[in-house]
């Protein structure tokens, strides 16, 4: 199963996922990361190639360093490829986001967080994977 398939399957009974964008480091173009998550469903990824730290979508607004935890696969792996799935309304604004990670150790794909977007404009979030 690909990361995109995992995200779409996870939201099968929710809002249809209309876009899936793979995370790419804005510093070096890298596609492998360590990922941290907080209780507030905020995610931050650190590029394994250059160390650049970036937030996924609007996570910077909800970030709390104190409760950040490393995402870990069931195999113990903590290095991932990442993708952001967006569920858009007919008018193109985002109403739901889903973050999937693929473990680089064992290849398992899973959804680690999803959260509601209840403001506009929000369509810029689609590409902030
Ligand atoms: Zn990088
Ligand atoms: Zn794994």
Image (cartoon, rainbow, N blue to C red):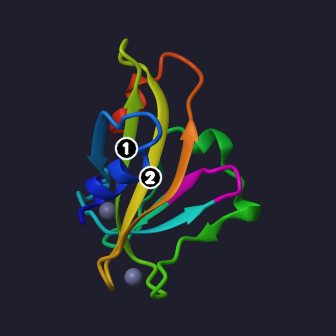
Element type where label 2 sits in the image: strand
| Residue with the mark numbered 2 | 99
Q: Residue at x 36, y 15 (%)?
A: 90
Is residue 24 shown to the viewer in this render?
A: no
Which label number is shown at residue 54? none
Where is residue 8 shown, x and y percent of the image?
Answer: 33, 48
Where is residue 29 shown, x and y percent of the image?
Answer: 23, 57
Which label number is shown at residue 85? 1
Q: Which residue is drawn at 33% across and 85% down?
A: 105
Where is residue 89 shown, x and y percent of the image?
Answer: 41, 20
Position above or below: 121 against 75:
above
Residue 104 picture quarter: bottom left
Q: Residue at x 42, y 19 (%)?
A: 93
Q: Tell me if 96 is positioned left or right of 63 in this view.
A: left
Residues rendered magenta in the picture: 38-44
Look at the numbered discs 1 and 2 and tell me whether their residues touch, using CB distance below 8 Å: yes
Could you give the CA–CA distance between mark 1 and mark 2, rounded to whole angstroms? 6 Å
Main secondary structure along the magenta-highlighted residues: loop
User: Which quadrant does the N terminus fall into?
Assistant: bottom left
């Amino acid at each position: 199963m690909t990361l995109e398939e995992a995200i779409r399957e996870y939201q099968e009974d929710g809002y249809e996922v209309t876009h899936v964008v793979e995370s790419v480091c804005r510093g070096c173009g890298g596609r492998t990361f360590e990922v941290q998550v907080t209780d507030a469903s905020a995610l931050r990824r650190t590029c394994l190639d250059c160390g650049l730290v970036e937030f996924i979508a609007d996570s910077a607004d909800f970030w709390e360093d104190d409760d950040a935890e490393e995402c870990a696969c069931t195999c113990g792996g903590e290095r991932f490829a990442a993708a952001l799935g967006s569920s858009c309304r007919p008018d193109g604004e985002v109403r739901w986001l889903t973050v999937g990670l693929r473990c680089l150790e064992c290849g398992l794909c899973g959804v680690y967080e999803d959260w509601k977007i209840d403001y506009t404009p929000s369509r810029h979030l689609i590409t902030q994977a």
